[in-house]
Image (cartoon, rainbow, N blue to C red):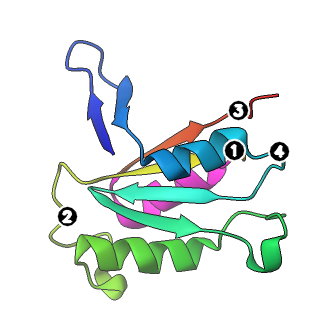
Amino acid sequence: MECYEDPENPGQVYVRLLRQDLLEELVMSKKRGRLVVLMVDEEFLVYRPTNGTRMTSPPNVDLLVKDVSKVLGRDVWSVGKNNASKDSSVHIFTDMDLYDLSDLLAKELNVRVFCHLFHRVS
């Protein structure tokens, strides 16, 4: 998957490629809350509910901070202060409203976070 920001329209982000299996699962799932995919730079973090049930709440912010920090090569204890590449970004792909979570994650990690909300196909 590849995301890029349009240089002529700052803030406008385009997704060039999403892993086909994850894209199909996000778009074709008949139930909401089955999948949350984070793309951290070029790495994927996939969160699914246990036992095939749906997620009733988003993943825990502390867990996300820990996982994303590890992918970024940061120490969790000094997460907002050190060696963050200015180009680092986190993209959240889901069919749930996680905009508040993305704001919290951006503040905790001091990186740009984009939330992409997918709508199911009827």
Q: Which residue is mark 1?
A: 95
Reply yes or no: does residue 106 show up in magenta.
Answer: yes
Are circles 1 and 2 on residues that touch, CB within 8 Å?
Answer: no
Q: Main secondary structure of the magenta part?
A: helix
Q: Residue at x 47, y 58 (%)?
A: 38
The answer to whether one can see residue 99 in this image is: no
Q: Which residue is mark 3?
A: 119
Q: Residue at x 76, y 55 (%)?
A: 33
Coordinates of residue 43 in the picture (x, y in percent): 32, 63
Picture quarter containing residue 108? bottom left
Q: Which residue is mark 4?
A: 30
Q: Residue at x 30, y 15 (%)?
A: 9
Q: Secondary structure at mark 2?
A: loop
Q: Amino acid at mark 2?
A: Ala
Coordinates of residue 80 in the picture (x, y in percent): 32, 69
**If the image is split into quadrants, where does the N terminus sit?**
top left
Q: Amino acid at mark 3?
A: His
Q: Amino acid at mark 1?
A: Asp
State which region is magenta. 98-111
Picture quarter containing residue 73? bottom left
Are circles 1 and 4 on residues that touch, CB within 8 Å?
Answer: no
Are circles 1 and 3 on residues that touch, CB within 8 Å?
Answer: yes
Reply yes or no: does residue 44 show up in magenta.
Answer: no
Q: Which residue is mark 2?
A: 84
Mark found first going from the N terminus, 3 or 2? 2
The answer to whether one can see residue 105 in this image is: yes
Q: Secondary structure at mark 4?
A: loop
In three-dimensional space, the C-alpha distance between marks 4 and 3, rounded to whole angstroms, equals: 10 Å
